[in-house]
Amino acid sequence: MLILNCPYCGRDKDETELTAGGEAHLKRFGPGSSDQDFEGYLFGRANPKGLHFERWRCAAGCGKWFHAARCTATLEIFGTYKAQTLEPPQVIKDAITAKRPGWSWRNFS
Amino acid sequence: MKRNSVFAVAREAMRQHSGWRRTWANPEPKKFYDVIIIGAGGHGLATAYYLGKNFGITNVAVIEKGWLGGGNTGRNTTIIRSNYLQDPSAAIYEKARSLYEDLSQDLNYNVMFSPRGVMMLAQTQHEIRGYQRTAHANSLQGVKTEFICSARVKELCPIMNIDGPRYPVLGALWQARGGSARHDAVAWGYARACSDMGMHILQKTEVTGISQKDGTVTGVDTSRGQIGCKKLGMVVAGHASVVAEMAGFQLPIESVPLQALVSEPIKPCMDVVVMANTVHGYMSQSDKGEMVIGGGTDAYNAYTQRGSFHHLEETVRALIETFPMVSRLKMLRHWGGIVDVTGDRSPILSKTPLGNTFINCGWGTGGFKAIPGSGWGFAELMAKGESPLTAEFGLDRFRVGRFIDESVAAGVAH
């Protein structure tokens, strides 16, 4: 049972109060992009065994979308942060580095 | 390999069972094989078996990180059916179901295939229309199914409460030749037959890398050294993305836990398999008497082989309404398997961007029933470069938008 802290309302939420939204930090490719880029945006997923960045929604709370850094092998949560960003904030990166030195995920490390 | 038969049982009974041999060999890896299959689960072993049986390719190694059949093959609810809507799905699942019919004879190993019948309950008007459509499609595809009324459902499965207040049973899609089989025996039977053909099954051998030259695979790095190969097949279910990353490409797959549980053994009370998709639960009774119950998938990626507790609660709650007698049952075991779910919820049997490398994955929540058909088609794809069974299941369908648009591996009952 996951418990995530919503960075908007500041409350700890049980996973039954949240909606999982899949991989975070996807770059959107729309009309005019190549078929390969569009396919990657729609279907290509990192699906790592280990550190993962995800979107979650505080569905039974404030209703806002936020991001979480989580390990898919141990279910450890490294932190949550607001969604209005193109990459994880430094404080989250530092929290991950403290436990997983040398980590990388897509373009981040 | 000595053949199993009633005479063998009698002979061994006379000499205190001293003559049984190991079911498969445990060899040291060779330096080179014509074909390497990563993953000794049902699909991987079936692929190796049909490579040998149908195409005479026996210089094959099946490499397994853990133990044989210890992944999803040992973690599913063993339901076998082929009542799918779309032609490509119906073709491969019906091929698998028909191979299951005489698999015990073919492998000379009792896989305990029990065609006891599978019913998928219609509990809403929408489901009635959907299943009637599927029954019509199946009759065109040569898959024998029928839509039955609620009185017939009650006759086939008397322990069911068809007048449930929230979701009454209005009818069902019935496949009389669907059923179940013994999951371990399927893996063991294929392993025995493969070993008998001289193939190597390398357990406790983890693949750590995939070596390539000029865009073509040359071998794999393993925890027991480097092994070369001409062709490579990846058949690793939940870990498909992890192995694909070693080969340098990405898959349209996300891995999530799917849970199941079994009750204490009770007297025979239910001789069909029942699936209730609206309320997300399915149940059958094993030969030991345990009620085998399957639930839904978790909503988020994980590789933990357990899953969230509230899904169990939802599944059991749903089943208690339809089967009031299970409310007093104690549950003995509960487990999760990591299922690989694709963008269109249909499997992938395909060539890959890496030359001479093939992938069989994406079976999601419905892989066990497909094992023989998947192995049959994937072996043909690996041997000849194409197969009518797998033609529609290529990786390129996500780029061109030619999806197999039914939730064959959806996060609901399968």
Image: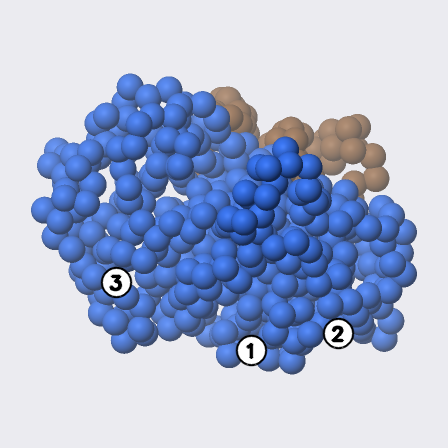
Residue pointed to by mark 2? B355
Q: CA distance from mark 1 to mark 2?
A: 17 Å
Which residue shows up at 53% across the image and 27% down it? A2
Residue pointed to by mark 1? B387
Q: Could you tell me residue B177's position as x and y percent?
A: 32, 58
Going by the numbered disc 3, the residue's amino acid type is: Thr
**From what the image shows, is residue B186 above or below residue B257?**
below
- Whether the residues at callouts 1 and 2 have beta carbons within 8 Å, the answer is no
Q: Could you tell me residue A43's position as x and y percent?
A: 55, 61
Please name the color used to draw chain A: brown
- For residue B145, which numbered disc appears in the image? 3
Q: In the image, which lettered chain appears blue?
A: B
Which residue shows up at 20% across the image and 41% down it? B157
Going by the numbered disc 2, the residue's amino acid type is: Gly
Q: Are marks 1 and 2 on the same chain?
A: yes
Using the image as rendered, state which of residue B72 and residue A89 is in the foreground: B72
Q: CA distance from mark 1 to mark 3?
A: 26 Å
**From what the image shows, is residue A89 above or below residue B106?**
above
**From what the image shows, is residue B359 above or below residue B291?**
below
Tag in front: 1 or 2: 1
Going by the numbered disc 1, the residue's amino acid type is: Ser
Q: Are marks 1 and 3 on the same chain?
A: yes
Which residue shows up at 74% across the image and 36% down it? A93
Residue furthest front in the image: B14
